[in-house]
Amino acid sequence: MVVAARTASSFKDRVLEILSYVPDPEIPCVSVVDLGIVRDVRDDAVIITPTYTGCPATLAIEADIRAVLDKAGLSALKIETVLTPPWSTDWISAEGREKLRAYGIAPPLRTAPQCPRCGSAHTEELSRFGSTPCKSLHRCLDCREPFDRFKCH
């Protein structure tokens, strides 16, 4: 019994490692695993949830995942898109948050956003709508640089 669990875990770990090289099509500094888009790996399927219901990148994400699974000899794995529960910014890994910050996108926090360029918390929201539906546009009031922030949801 323990051997079967270890084997299942190593299969899941192998698939997650493979998928950790699939960049998000809109934010290539982070992978679909970093963002928490890949929710689970089962024996027969990879479960994904887009960052935003109706996200225009969903089909591209599915195609990119399919390509790397096929290349790795895992073409039998299905890709299932699940919308419930909806994706949450809480699913972004610590590494993913740091990659976002380094890329110039303020990672989501439940507090006022910090500027990813200078670190100031003296910021303002310019628009609830950013470069993609899952982000809002902000500006640092100290260095005056605009930046995207993932919407907390």
Image (tube, helix red, strand yellow):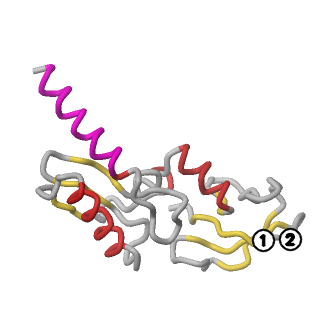
Q: List x then y, in percent, for residue 103.
A: 65, 60
Alpha carbons under labels 2 and 1: distance apart: 6 Å
Checking the image for residue 148, the label placed there is none
Q: Are marks 2 and 1 in contact (CB under 8 Å)?
A: yes
- Image quadrant containing the N terminus: top left
Question: How many labels were placed on the picture?
Answer: 2
In-front residue for pair 109/1 = 1
| Magenta stretch contains residue 7 | yes
Q: Vertically, is 40 above or below 29?
A: above
The quadrant in which residue 95 appears is top right
Q: Which residues are magenta?
A: 2-18
Q: Secondary structure at mark 1?
A: strand
In-front residue for pair 145/85 = 145
Q: Vertically, is 97 above or below 29?
A: above
Mark 2 Cα shell of 10 Å, populated few (<14), some (14-19), many (≥20): few
Q: Please give left or right for residue 132 compared with residue 117 in the image.
A: left
Q: List x then y, in percent, for residue 43.
A: 14, 45
Q: Amino acid at mark 1?
A: Arg
Give the labeled residue for mark 1: 139
Q: Secondary structure at mark 2?
A: loop
Give the labeled residue for mark 2: 144
| Magenta stretch contains residue 76 | no
